[in-house]
Image (cartoon, rainbow, N blue to C red):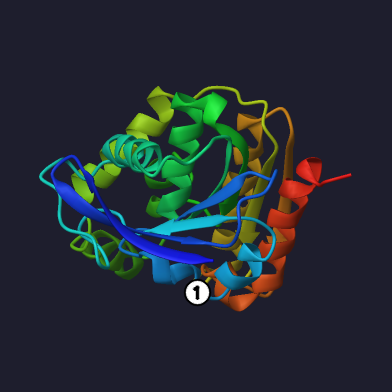
Amino acid sequence: MTMETFITVNDAKIFAKLIGTKSIKPTVVMDAGYGDYSKGWKSIVSEVASLTEVLVYDRAGLGKSEASSNPRTSLEMVRELKELLEKMRMTPPYLLVGHSFGGVNVRLYASIFPDDVSGLLLVDATPEDYRERFLPTMSEEFQEAYNNQFTLEGNYDEFGESLRQLKEYKMRLSVPLIVLSAGKKDYYSDESQKLWNLLQEETLQISSNSERIIAENSAHYIQDDEPLIVIDAIKRLLEPFEEN
């Protein structure tokens, strides 16, 4: 089953796509990276929908969704996702999957609404102290390109505010967490890759039930480079809900 719909959230119509059939397993809710939208999951969404119901959506101002007058910070996006799920009458808990900046959003969602979440999958997610510890170690060219990308969805300051919000609301979770990180990042030296690996490893500390998987042959878009790794991680997080 596939259903596409537009739901008014605050002052914007948000595009959402529901795929698959609801079962005793949690609905998988996928949040794409900065400037990305629902099509960012096209490599895996059909396979995941064979396991359980899947929701992909376009955040305000991206894809088919209207722009919002609210700040483009993670906290606003989390509130909007919460409203979207409620208006669609979705039943928690959800298995949240976040790629890159989407990982910031799903982490913040799990901290604010822990009862809504059955598990977390972070797909090469942005660490909370990326700017302080990682970005300064990169070349000036890399830093300039990084800073100049913030035109699609929120500006540089709003992105920084999102990382600050993640720290402010940070709490120790008990839900299963899989941290899936890229082992072959574009433009990364050996030293940069090691630091990235360290920051990803430290993310395990947010849950008492966590596991790290390195996608050795993947750059940032693991769902495209090694889709089976992402699909397998989702399967594992759904296993506790398998029918007997």
Quadrant location, the N terminus: bottom right
User: For this rendering, which residue is in front, 218 or 52?
Assistant: 52
Q: Mark 1 highlights which residue?
A: 42
Image-quadrant location for residue 234: bottom right
- Residue 23 appears at what percent x and percent y? 67, 49
Label 1 secondary element: loop
- Residue 43 appears at what percent x and percent y? 55, 76
| Number of dots carrying numbers | 1
Q: In the rendered view, does 13 fall on the left or right side of 172?
A: left
Quadrant location, the C terminus: top right
Q: Residue at the location (68% across, 75% down)?
A: 217
Q: Residue furthest right?
A: 244
In the figure, 63 relative to 53: above or below?
Answer: below
Whether residue 24 is visible to the viewer of this picture, yes or no, is yes
Q: Residue at the location (79% across, 47% down)?
A: 239
Whether residue 155 is visible to the viewer of this picture, yes or no, is no
User: For this rendering, which residue is in front, 208 or 65?
Assistant: 65
Q: In the rendered view, does 32 fall on the left or right side of 52?
A: left
Q: Residue at the location (66% across, 74% down)?
A: 226
In the figure, 120 relative to 17: above or below?
Answer: above
Image-quadrant location for residue 82: top left
Q: Residue furthest left?
A: 69
- Residue 167 appears at what percent x and percent y? 42, 28
Q: Residue at the location (45% across, 39% down)?
A: 128
